[in-house]
Amino acid sequence: MKTAISLPDALYRNAEKTAEFLGISRSKLYSLALEEFLQKHNGEMIIKKINEVYEKIDQSEFDDILDAGIEALRELTKDDTW
């Protein structure tokens, strides 16, 4: 699909030089750059959604499990010399 975008002159010139250096078209360069940008931010969006779900969970229901785990770790390491 074709699209038109506006870029600052310096960014355009840098993109032209980079595409030429890499031996790819300007369109390919923009496509690769956009793909990388979206992958990065899609990961951030997924993490944000997961965090939103966890924020809705009442964490206090896990206190007994966490306490038991900590106590078991203390018991396992009580004779360790640090």
Image (tube, rainbow, N blue to C red):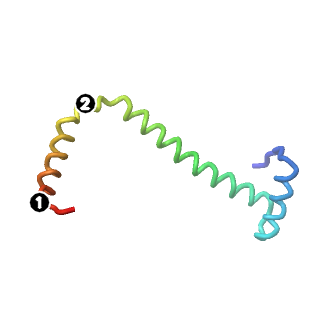
Left or right: 8 in relation to 49: right
Q: Which residue is found at the position 88% from the left and 50% from the top?
A: 9
Q: On the image, numbered disc 1 is attached to which residue? A: 79
Which one is earlier in the sequence, the residue at label 2 or at label 1? 2
In this rendering, position of residue 47 left or right of residue 9: left
Does dot 1 land on a helix, a strand or a loop?
loop
Closer to the camera in the image, 20 or 76: 76
- Vertical comparison of 49 with 82: above or below: above
Identity of the residue drawn at 43% across and 33% down: 52
Looking at numbered disc 2 in the image, what kind of residue is underneath it?
A: Ser
Q: Which residue is mark 2?
A: 60
Instruction: Identify which residue, 75 or 25, lies in the foreground.
Output: 75
Q: Is residue 61 above or below residue 9?
A: above
Disc marking residue 11: none
Identified at 15% across, 51% down, the residue is 74
- Residue 70 at x, y = what percent? 19, 46
Residue 14 sits in quarter? bottom right
Q: Tell me, yes or no, whether the two marked residues, 2 and 1, touch with CB atoms within 8 Å.
A: no
